[in-house]
Amino acid sequence: MRGIRKLGVAAVALAVGVLGAGKSHALVDDPFTSYTQPANALVMPFDQSEDHATFFIVSNLSGLSPAGDGFIAGVTTHWSYWSEDCSHLADVFVCLTLNDTVIVSPSEISAIDAGNNPIGPQIDLSGNRGFVVVTAYATDEICSDASVRGNLPVDDALVGTYTFASISEGFSFGNDAIGLGLDFSGSYTELPGDDFIDFDTFSIQSFNPEDLDVSTVVLLSLKEQSGSGSTSPVEIGPNTANTVADLVYYDNLEIPTSLPNATIRCVKFTSLIPGEDALIPDTISLLSSGILRLDRFTPVIGGTTGRFIYGLHGQALGQFGGSSNMKYKVTGLFD
């Protein structure tokens, strides 16, 4: 993703120079995050609390480990689990040979060798909610852990998806993992931010909140170089400081309704169904589908802060449901 990012920025700059001052209607590529292309690191939320279950699917599409004049067809992946209260829960290494795939449940976590065999003790995170960071590293011929090659990260390697299930409600939803590449030096996983790119508003789409049968909103507050143990200088981890965002709901007539601020720390599980612990209090009536807008983050995110926030919304109205990632607007490229 590192090379893709730089090519995208260069292409935008070239387009601006060629087209001059005329108004542009072209899409602006997101130069930092991918839900479709292989990445160095994947971030995925999980809910393994009572009556809930989660599964992760991670594949190595193109990750190779440099070895002398050639390559080893595989990488080792470090899975670091974090809870919603910012606690570090578990670490395991999973070998992923080229084109290999693993399916993992937070209730059955273990290291996995090159033959897809579990090794070592098994960890059960039942009762917890949080997120996992899966980072690709160079390995050796027997797929040892990352330390054998000095915690050398490998870009353009992994893709992933995840699925949540609420067992009693009979509802589940899935989505693509958040894919992140390395910084330009290739030394650590990079979150969105740059001197010449600004991030304006963040938006969550919703059916009419008062009609929803199920609504799960997950907001992930992340920080660069804040992982666990010896891999900490490379990896994404939780932002343990509070970030406050202004909230406004725009209905389908574009009428804004101001809502109480949201405080986000590490990972926040909440809902758009009006209620005591939801983003929309039950004292406010919203009568149509619309957009929940988050902006004016305090302290700021993006830029050169090394901090960023992602989000998703899983929702169901009767038989109709699904999930979507929170959208953010990239500005500053044409300033």
Image (spheres, rainbow, N blue to C red):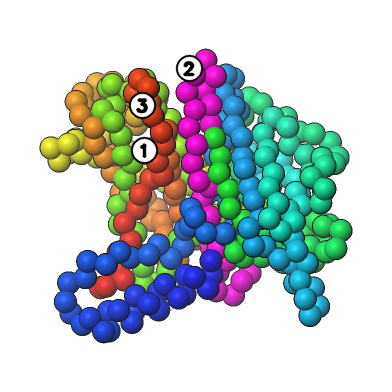
Quadrant of the image containing the C terminus: bottom left
Residue 69 appears left or right of 260: right
Which mark, by number, is residue 320?
3
Tell me the magenta residue range.
164-190
Would residue 82 be visible to someone looking at this image?
no
Q: State the image coordinates of residue 95 (x, y, percent, origin top left).
A: 76, 52
- For marks 2 and 1 on the same chain, the one whose residue lies earlier in the sequence: 2
Check whether the beta carbons of the residues at disc 2 and disc 1 lie within 8 A of each other: no
Q: Quadrant of residue 132?
A: top right
Point out the tag, 1 or 3, that comes first from the N-terminus.
1
Q: Which residue is mark 2?
A: 169
The residue under the point 35% across, 20% down is 318
Relative to 273, 265 lies left or right: right
The amino acid sitting under disc 1 is Ala
State the image quarter where residue 315 is shown.
top left
Q: Who comes first in sequence, dot 2 or dot 3?
A: 2
Mark 1 — residue? 262
The residue sitting at the top extreme is 168
